[in-house]
Amino acid sequence: MTGYTKKKAYGLRLSALLLALLLVFPLTACGGKTDSTGTEQIDEKAEDTVFRFMGQNISLGEVYLYAKPVIEDYDKTYGKDIWLMSVQLEDGTKQDMQSLTRKDVIENIVKVKLLLSKASEYGVSLTDEDRSQVEIQTEAFWKNLTDEQIDEMHLNRDLVQTCIEENLLATRVYETMMDEAGIEISDETARETTFFDLYFPCYTEQSDGVLIPMGGAEKQEQYDKAVQAYNTLVSPAEDNVKKDPSLLASYYNLKDATYYTMTPEEIKTTYGKDVYEMLYKLEDGSCSLVTETEYGYHVFCMKALTDREATDKRKARLERDKRNEYFNQIYLNWLKTSDPNYHYEDSVNREVYAQIQFDY
């Protein structure tokens, strides 16, 4: 162990949830057209149909409008090699990123279609302001398409505008559902705490990673330094050091002394229950006494018991996850009743879908 480090694992696969795509760019599949009597007219270019859902043909161009922002976001965030990688699923099996993402794109189209079908039930419609925003977004997206993309994916401006308008309506339905659900996360649940760990290690690390405990004299020296550092921190004459404990870290050449932002559970897991309880008795701007752990001595300087920015970000993430969990439960019920014959594995024409390249 080389000091206390907070490690967070971030999955490479984007969540297969509605807002994952809505936040990239508001687009959705538009489906088949209807005549003046409301009877569905099946697209003549059936060979361009990727799948059918709720009696509608979802064309190659429509799916492309959904896939394009995802492909660009993955390439920008992870690089094009992302499509060569595999992801381990919850059941322990592995699947390549491209197959997973292709399924995510289709699933999000299905979710938006279902939301659209519930607009009247939730009393949701678009305002004039919404429609004006759609016009602006349509123009921006259309200008970003190349002639090659328009030709190969059979795109036109009306298709883009209709898709954006429908997706915005689906978003409004989703927001109304979440408002009615009343899902909220408290500050206490989302709390992130930021503190400085002035850490004096009591071991040496060999090149092979083996930790060698310090002898009695060396350990005593580290303790004396920690006490000296604490006295400096609480000295009225050293206010600049109290405001910036990293100055002491530099003075004592403490390579693993730094600021950490952690949840209560992360603190407990990393430092133990005793340190956890001690930290939450500190006030912002205060410092702990010299505290011993199995790895050495620490003086903790509390910057923010509740780090407002970090807590708000975590709260938003937790609320998003909880809302998506709630929505997915409803979505599965909707799917069973709206189109029980739809199944990704059987309903999607893979040959047509393959015309959209993820690893170009």
Image (tube, helix red, strand yellow):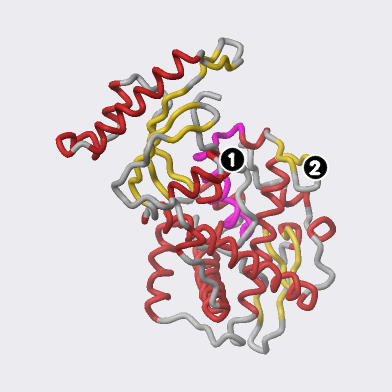
- Residue type (three-letter) at the residue carrying disc 1: Ala
* Left or right of residue 158: residue 346: right
Residue 242 in the image: above or below residue 303: above
**Residue 139 appears in the rendering:** yes
Residue topped by disc 1: 9
SS majority, magenta: helix
Q: Residue at x 30, y 29 (%)?
A: 229
Asked which quadrant contains residue 142, the reply is bottom left
Q: Is residue 304 above or below residue 255?
A: below
At 67% from the left edge and 73% from the top edge, which residue is drawn?
114
Task: Depth check: give the residue in front, 318 or 235.
Answer: 235
Label 2 belongs to which residue? 92
Of helix, strand and loop, which one carries label 1? loop
Please state which of residues 79 and 197 is positioned toward the viewer in this rendering: 197
Q: Quadrant of the N terminus?
A: top right
Tell me residue 49's x, y (percent): 73, 60
Please tell me whether mark 2 sits on a helix, a strand or a loop: loop
Indicate whether 124 appears above or below 94: below
Local crowd size for mark 1, using a 10 Å CA cut-off: few (<14), some (14–19), many (≥20): few
**Front residue of this view, candidates 220 and 74:** 220
Q: Residue 65 magenta-drawn?
A: yes
Total tally of numbered discs in the picture: 2
Q: Is residue 78 magenta?
A: yes
Q: Which span of residues is magenta-colored? A: 61-81
Q: Is residue 156 visible?
A: no
| Residue 26, image x, y percentages | 50, 62
The C terminus, quarter of image: top right
Sequence-wise first label, 1 or 2: 1
Label 1 to label 2: alpha-carbon separation: 17 Å
